[in-house]
Structures are given as C-alpha cells and as structure tokens.
Amino acid sequence: MKENQTTYAILGLLTTECRTGYEIKQLIDRSLNHFWKISYGQIYPTLQKLVNNELATVNSVAQTDKPDKKEYVITTKGKEVLQDWLREPIKQLPSERNEILLKLFFSSQQEKQLTISQLKNAQQKLTERYHMYCGIEDSISNSPSPDRTYWLITLDYGKRTTCASIEWCKDTINKLYDEEAHNL
Amino acid sequence: MKENQTTYAILGLLTTECRTGYEIKQLIDRSLNHFWKISYGQIYPTLQKLVNNELATVNSVAQTDKPDKKEYVITTKGKEVLQDWLREPIKQLPSERNEILLKLFFSSQQEKQLTISQLKNAQQKLTERYHMYCGIEDSISNSPSPDRTYWLITLDYGKRTTCASIEWCKDTINKLYDEEAHNL
DNA sequence: TACTCCATGTAACCCGTTACATGATTAG
DNA sequence: CTAATCATGTAACGGGTTACATGGAGTA
C-alpha cells in the first residue's frame, strides 16, 4: 500500500477527537489550514481507503436531531503506521510556488510604481494573515486538547515566517522608492 | 483563453535572453527554482500553446555543431498580456504544504526525543538551503542581466524566511528539551 | 419560506511529475 | 567507445479542486 502525506494527515486527525469526515474537515479548516488544506473530495475517499487497509474501522451512527453519520476509529495497526511515518525523516522542505516572487521576477517589464503598489498589497495581505494566526492561536490556547502544545508550535512557525515576509515587503518597498528618487 | 500562472512564468522567461525550451529550463533550474519549479512536460506544450495564441512566434534554427533548435520570440500581444498579468493584484499568498509542520501537529503521538531529532534534521536541511541561496545569489550578482535587481530581491525573500525557519527550529528544540528536563 | 448547519459522497477536470523515446555532437 | 551536453517531445499517472447531487433538522 502506498500512501501519500494527505492520507497520513487524515489518519493523524483520527487520533484527535475527530470521528467523522465532517468533523475532520472542520478541524482542518480551523487548525491545519495554514499548512495543509484538504477538501471533502479527498477526505471521504481516503477514510474509505483507511478502512480497506485496516488502519481504521467505521460504524454508522443514527442520530435523531441530525443526519446520520459514520464514525471512524483508528486501529492499533493504524497507530503503528502513523508512528512509523512520524519517525521517518522529512523528505522535502517546503518549496512553494510564490505568486508575489514570480511577478517580481519579471517586474523589470513594468513601471516601478506598479511594482510598489503590488508589494503594498502583498504586505497588507500578509498583515491580515498575521492577525488571523493570532486569532487561531487564541482559540487553540483556550482549547483543552492534549495536542495543544504542538499545535501552537505550528502557529508560531506561521507567525515568524509571515513576520519575516512582512519585513521583506517593507524593506523592498523602501528600496524601490529610493531607486525611483535617485533617478529623478 | 485561460492561462494558469505557469504559462505566465514561461511567457515572462521569453523576455529574458531565453529563446528555447531548453534554455528556459536551465534558467528555471538556476534562478527560479526556489519558488517556481517547471518540468519539460510543461514547458514544451506551453510554448506551443503560446504560439497558438499568438503570444509568441517560433522558428526553427539549424545548427551545425549542435542539434537543431526552435527559437521562440514573444510578440507585442504577448508583452501586453504579460504586463496585464503583472498589474493584476496577487490572488493568493503562498500557503504551502509543510511536511515538518504536519508531523509536528501529530507529535504528541510519539516520544519527545524522536520529535527533537526530526527537528534537528529539518534545521540542518534548512541551513543547507540557506547556503544554496547564498550560492545562487553570488551567481546572479555576477550576471549582467537587467533583471538582476529583481532576481536578487526574490533571493532575499528566500534567505529571510529560511532564516526565520531556522530560528524557529532552534527555539522549538530548546523548548522541547526544557519540557523534557522538567519532567525528569 | 429560506437559509444555515449537519452530513456524505462522486465525476469531471486541471495541473504537474515521471518516465520514456529519440537523436545529434563533442570530449575524454 | 562512452559519457555528457544539447535538444525536443509525449503518455501515463497521481493528486487535488470544484462543482454537482442529495437530503434532514432547526431557525429566523
């Protein structure tokens, strides 16, 4: 059986309080979203796959006040597989596609003023993101989950790299302004 | 015509000295790789697409000392399309999938010592990456391209965020050590 | 009545990587 | 002779998003 990392993400989420595909999606959107987005189109088939490979079990639960649901529980084998994966050294560092950098790479093709507004826009978006992280941080801090410590560490990462990006925006904007002034 | 960002990347590269698919691939590997990787499987079909949409023209060039090649030249329409795209506000901030954070998110499932070695490994890989950036920086600094200034700015971004990540690794490792010591 | 939340699922499509296929020229 | 560099391409596959389909229960 070959599993991609998203499979492990979903397997890992079964070690939290999450029991259903719906709950998994909610937790992802609340706490994992900043470094691993997953859509329903992956969640439900993957849960099925986990059951097929005996890494989890399902059972349907009838509810009176809400639609019925399927509860998934990680098996002993599932936990072992998860731990094996956790122990494996990381294969690749994040190397994301970065739209801002791509545009900047070709910015000699446009006026400096336009590049500067582009950067200001990016800086603003980054600042919003920073505040969002602070919000998520608060909500996790108030949750009683035993994973809380580690979850906060992932947020710390997001905050720090975002901070660095914002600083870079600021400095780059100033640099371009200086060059502009120098040419006049 | 709907174009994805990779199409614009290749269109943009036609504004540099690059004229052939092969040269484009080389420049990507040397200078763009840290934020936008592109494989031959995309380059050649995309070049064809650019020609079909009249954003570039081709002509075959016979060479005696080397295999024949196809030279692509960006058209006026192509430059306009590129500039329109450059002017458009960025749609999304980078939100990469991060393997380190994913593992860390579930690290309450394993011993702290294992998590610490995972982080040390990550820190080392990040440090290597930092040195690689410095290397690319040197090679770009010595190139006479008019795009040099902007290319260096993209590298500055890489260096800064990598630095922030390394700091985060260090601090996190220390934090986990402290917790470990506290429990003993 | 309409909207939101709960809940599960699939099919079409897009994007991108990998592996394969081909072949000329030059240097060791 | 062999490896490396130059050079172009495609087919298969995998992963992921989006849109669609369905439908109950509660609330404004």
Image: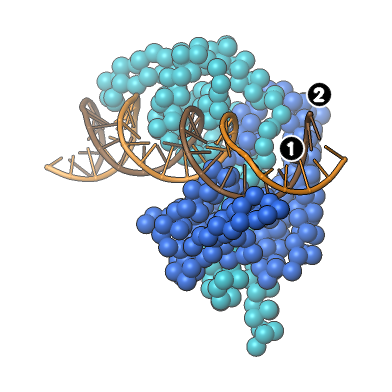
Chain colours: A blue, B cyan, C brown, D orange
Q: Which quadrant does the C terminus of chain A fall into? A: top right
A65, B184: nearer the viewer: A65
Q: What residue type is labelled 1?
A: Ala
Report the side of A22 relative to B59 (left or right).
Answer: right
B67, B184: nearer the viewer: B184
Res A143 seen here: yes
Q: Give x and y (percent) for residue B82.
A: 61, 21
**Element type where label 1 sits in the image:** helix
Q: In this view, does A10 lie above or below A15?
A: above
Q: How far apart are marks 1 and 2 (CA)?
A: 26 Å
A153, B86: nearer the viewer: A153
Q: Give x and y (percent) for residue B183.
A: 67, 85
Q: Residue at x 71, y 29 (%)?
A: B89
Q: Which residue is drawn at 74% across and 69% down?
A: A144
Q: Which residue is drawn at 61% across and 56% down?
A: A62
Q: Is residue A10 above or below residue D1?
A: below
User: Given the image, what chain letter belongs to the residue carrying mark 1?
Assistant: A
Q: Which amino acid does label 2 sit on?
A: Leu
Report the side of D5 relative to A59 (left or right).
Answer: left
Q: Residue at label 2?
A: A184
Q: Is residue B166 above or below residue B22?
A: below
The image quadrant of residue A104 is top right
Q: Earlier in the sequence, mark 1 or mark 2?
A: 1
Residue farthest toward the bottom in the current orientation of the protein: B184
Q: Residue at label 1?
A: A122
Res A28 seen here: no
**Element type where label 2 sits in the image:** loop
Q: Which quadrant does the N terminus of chain A fall into? A: bottom left
Q: Give x and y (percent) for residue C5.
A: 73, 47
Q: Residues within 10 Å of mark 1 (few under 14, many from 20)?
A: many
